[in-house]
Image (cartoon, helix red, strand yellow):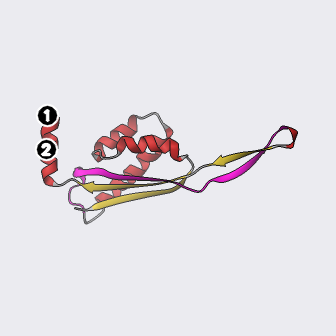
């Protein structure tokens, strides 16, 4: 059973905004996840869609994976990246901190075993 992955580092979006989209596509078929992300109105969904397309392309070019149609999103690993800090000067000589948060994301695709493919089609129809 082969794996393919894609990694995105230092994306200028906060971890809290990326987490609901990651939860949406986790353990879904790759094609279904692509469709979900394509219709989602969130900016983070566009970022995740581009990363998922990259992971699917990596799977298609991999020699370990036989059938690219049997892929599912096995893991979506999120992590907070470094925060860059800037100062905004305020009234009375005070300083307000501006934090530009970043996120690291890794998507791992795997092939579903043949026995699980058969049961999944029976449940749908």
Taking the view exactly as shown, the residue that stands out farthest to the right is 92
Question: What quarter of the picture does the C terminus occupy?
Answer: top left
Q: Which residue is mark 2?
A: 119
Residue 23 lies in quadrant: top left
Q: Residues within 10 Å of mark 2 (few under 14, many from 20)?
A: few
Residue 2 lies in quadrant: bottom left
Question: What quarter of the picture does the N terminus occupy?
Answer: bottom left
Residue range highlighted in magenta: 65-91
Q: Position of residue 21 (x, y in %)?
A: 42, 41
Q: Position of residue 78 (x, y in %)?
A: 45, 52
SS for tag 2?
Answer: helix
Give whichever of 97, 109 is nearer the camera. 97
SS for tag 1?
Answer: loop
Q: Position of residue 65 (x, y in %)?
A: 24, 61
Mark number displayed over residue 102: none
Q: Which residue is mark 1?
A: 125
Between disc 2 and disc 1, the foreground one is: 2
């Amino acid at each position: 059973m082969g794996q393919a992955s894609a990694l995105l580092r230092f994306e200028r979006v906060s971890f809290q905004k990326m987490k609901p989209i990651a939860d949406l596509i986790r353990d879904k078929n790759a094609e279904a996840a692509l469709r979900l992300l394509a219709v989602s109105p969130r900016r983070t969904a566009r970022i995740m869609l581009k990363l998922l397309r990259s992971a699917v392309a990596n799977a298609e070019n991999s020699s370990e994976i036989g059938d690219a149609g049997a892929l599912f999103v096995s893991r979506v690993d999120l992590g907070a990246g470094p925060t860059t800090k800037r100062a905004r000067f305020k009234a009375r000589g005070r300083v307000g901190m501006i934090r530009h948060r970043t996120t690291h994301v890794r998507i791992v695709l795997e092939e579903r075993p043949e026995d699980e493919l058969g049961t999944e089609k029976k449940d749908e129809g």
